[in-house]
Image (cartoon, rainbow, N blue to C red):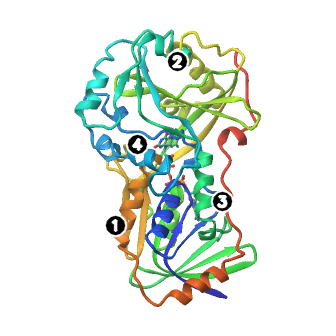
């Protein structure tokens, strides 16, 4: 059986694994990522793609740990997206340069001050009545503009996939990776399998960025899987003749709804609707949740026609490092057990932060005599299958419904 030596094996190709792999390769590490479905399957391709800057975590007027952890991210992403910083993500489609924030009641004027006081890069700027987008014209309260970009997530995954094609390996969904562990809590080697083909990888480090798959991978490696928590969401999609909108409707410290817009393969507009409704909807069936969201949208977006559109929903779990009260972790969560690093980014926007955390633990690439192994790995794995990018939920969904 073929055998390949490596610095780092990354398992799981969502935003975390891809950002980590890219940083490792740029740092001179010999690294490979294995994916058992499609890149971004799970949370990344289901996400709304908002590069949060922390403002929604300061709505109570306090600089929270979550806001502190995320406040540098919009600047880093902006530089990568405009190609002035690595990873160069200038091929990624930016769906919107900013989001809107509005409330159905008043008391909004403090929002701008909160952002400024909290030292956030994302400032909220009041949008004058005549400059409001048409879709928010009838909202009674103030409307703010937040410098939070929205990325088209499939194009982000495509961009990473193009940057690192040679380092990405498709493995089987079942039994695609098998660990050989030492008594000392280290992974000595990883057998990878695709169809009838197998190879043994001998990495110095194994990085688990498999989202909800991290728990079972940890158990497979003889580590506790109880360091993970899952927090479910039930998201709604609306498809049809809709205006473009990216933003949050706030209610106290909560975001009542968060809406982002995409286009499907046929050019139809699709809204993804998350926020509090997606948390509340976990116990509801799809049709009841869609009806609830329609009522909610009629309240928070007066004047927007929703009679001719189609509705669908999807469920997805947020996978995170476990917190005491099972609440949302304030930032990236990374732990080290022997030569195994386990990470959850907590937010897509924190991709750069999880890469930094993982690289800090691994340290710089070591110059040694592995040149021959590296050449071997390129030859051995040259014609291995490469993973595709996952389809977004609006392309996978077949059960769209109409509502009265
Ligand atoms: C509905 C929703 C909306 C969101 N919106 C936003 C937002 O607007 N902004 C934001 O910043 N964050 C958002 N988030 C959070 C964000 O999506 C996640 O924090 C982030 O995508 C997690 O990425 P990940 O790479 O850790 O995991 P995932 O995206 O889940 O990727 C894990 C990958 O590992 C692979 N894998 C699993 N098991 C194995 C295995 N055994 N072998 C090989 N591969 C394996 C999977 O197939 C998958 O490709 C949202 C989350 C959800 C659920």
Residue 352 placement: quadrant: bottom left
Please name which of the two marks, 3 or 2, marks the residue nearer to the observer.
2
> Mark 1 or 3 closer to N-term?
3
Residue 140 placement: quadrant: top left
Ligand 1 within 8 angstroms of badge 2 C-beta: no
Ligand 1 within 8 angstroms of badge 3 C-beta: yes
Q: Position of residue 243 (x, y in %)?
A: 62, 21
Residue 138 at least partly seen: yes
Image mark for residue 37 = 3
From the viewer's side, name the closer residue of 65 and 86. 86
Question: Could you tell me if the residues under marks 4 and 2 are in contact, i.e. CB atoms within 8 Å?
Answer: no
Q: Position of residue 153 (x, y in %)?
A: 58, 45
> Mark 4 or 1 closer to N-term?
4
Please name which of the two marks, 3 or 4, marks the residue nearer to the observer.
4
CA gap, disc 2 and disc 1: 43 Å
From the viewer's side, name the closer residue of 10 and 314. 10
Image mark for residue 74 = 4
> Mark 3 or 2 closer to N-term?
3
Judge whether 25 appears above or below 238 on screen: below
Judge whether 253 appears above or below 221 on screen: above
CA gap, disc 4 and disc 2: 23 Å
Q: Position of residue 325 (x, y in %)?
A: 33, 45
Disc 2 designates what residue? Answer: 133
Label 2 Cα neighbours within 10 Å, binned few <14 / some 14-19 / many ≥20: some
Label 3 Cα neighbours within 10 Å, binned few <14 / some 14-19 / many ≥20: some
Disc 1 designates what residue? Answer: 360
């Amino acid at each position: 059986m073929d055998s390949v030596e490596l610095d780092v094996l990354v398992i799981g190709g969502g935003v975390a694994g891809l950002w980590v792999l890219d940083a490792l390769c740029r740092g001179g590490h010999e690294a490979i990522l294995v994916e058992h479905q499609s890149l971004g399957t799970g949370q990344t391709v289901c996400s709304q793609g908002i590069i949060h800057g922390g403002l929604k975590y300061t709505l109570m007027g306090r600089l929270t740990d979550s806001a502190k952890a995320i406040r540098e991210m919009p600047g880093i992403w902006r530089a990568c997206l405009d190609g002035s910083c690595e990873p160069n993500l200038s091929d990624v489609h930016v769906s919107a340069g900013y989001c809107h924030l509005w409330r159905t009641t008043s008391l909004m004027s403090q929002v701008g001050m909160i952002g400024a006081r909290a030292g956030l890069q994302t400032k909220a700027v009041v949008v004058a009545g005549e400059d409001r987008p048409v879709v928010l014209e009838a909202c009674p309260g103030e409307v703010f503009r937040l410098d939070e970009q929205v990325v088209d997530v499939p194009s982000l995954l495509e961009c990473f996939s193009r940057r690192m094609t040679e380092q990405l390996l498709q493995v089987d969904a079942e039994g695609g990776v098998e660990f050989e562990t030492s008594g000392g809590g280290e992974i000595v080697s990883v057998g990878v399998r695709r169809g009838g083909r197998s190879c043994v990888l001998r990495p110095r480090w194994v990085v688990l960025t498999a989202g909800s798959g991290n728990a079972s991978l940890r158990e497979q490696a003889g580590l506790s899987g109880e360091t993970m928590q899952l927090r479910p969401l039930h998201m709604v999609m609306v498809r049809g003749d809709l205006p473009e909108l990216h933003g949050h409707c706030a209610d106290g410290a909560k975001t009542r709804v968060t809406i982002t817009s995409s286009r499907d393969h046929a050019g139809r507009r699709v809204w993804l609707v998350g926020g509090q409704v997606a948390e509340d909807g976990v116990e509801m069936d799809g049709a009841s949740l869609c009806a609830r969201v329609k009522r909610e949208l009629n309240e928070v977006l007066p004047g927007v026609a929703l009679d001719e559109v189609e509705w669908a929903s999807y469920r997805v779990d947020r996978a995170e490092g476990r917190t005491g009260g099972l609440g949302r972790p304030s930032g990236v969560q990374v732990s080290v057990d022997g030569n195994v690093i386990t990470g959850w980014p907590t937010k897509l926007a924190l991709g750069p932060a999880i890469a930094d955390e993982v690289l800090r633990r691994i340290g710089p690439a070591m110059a040694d005599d592995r040149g021959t192994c590296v050449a071997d790995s390129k030859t051995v794995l040259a014609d291995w299958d490469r993973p595709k990018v996952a389809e977004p939920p609006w392309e996978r969904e077949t059960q769209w419904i109409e509502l009265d």
